[in-house]
Image: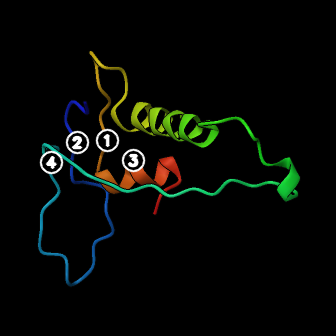
Amino acid sequence: MQDNPGFEGFVRDKYTALPETGEGIPGTEFTALWRYSYESISSIPQKPFYFNERSLDVKKVLMEAFFGPPKEGVYSPSVQSTLVQEGCS
């Protein structure tokens, strides 16, 4: 789990009311979408549960990037920053 997500390094303008802080929210939820790319219908794998396995692989990569190592975690200046690093928006 992230050790200490922050809320800092964001764009400030005349409407910004919140101060920056190194302490952020203790929990986050996000949704990720991806597409499978195949050159033709015949190139789609016929193996049962292939897409379930790939889905679990993607989830594992996203979780590792978002939370970091289980015992140490990873600091993020903001949830938005971490999601941008993962390629999510």
The residue lying at 45 percent from left, 55 percent from top is 32
Q: For residue 5, which numbered disc appears in the image?
A: 2
**Residue 24 disc label:** 4
Q: Amino acid at mark 4?
A: Gly
| CB under 8 Å between discs 1 and 2 | yes
Residue type highlighted by circle 3: Thr
| Quarter that holds the C terminus | bottom left
Q: Which residue is mark 3?
A: 82
Q: Contact (CB < 8 A) between labels 1 and 3? A: yes
The answer to whether mark 4 and mark 3 are in CB contact below 8 A is: no
Q: Position of residue 86 (x, y in %)?
A: 49, 47
Q: Position of 18 compared to 83: left or right?
A: left
User: Which is more N-terminal, label 3 or label 1?
Assistant: 1
Q: Residue at x 25, y 33 (%)?
A: 2
Mark 2: which secondary structure?
Answer: loop
Quadrant (top left, top right, bottom left, bottom right) of the N terminus? top left
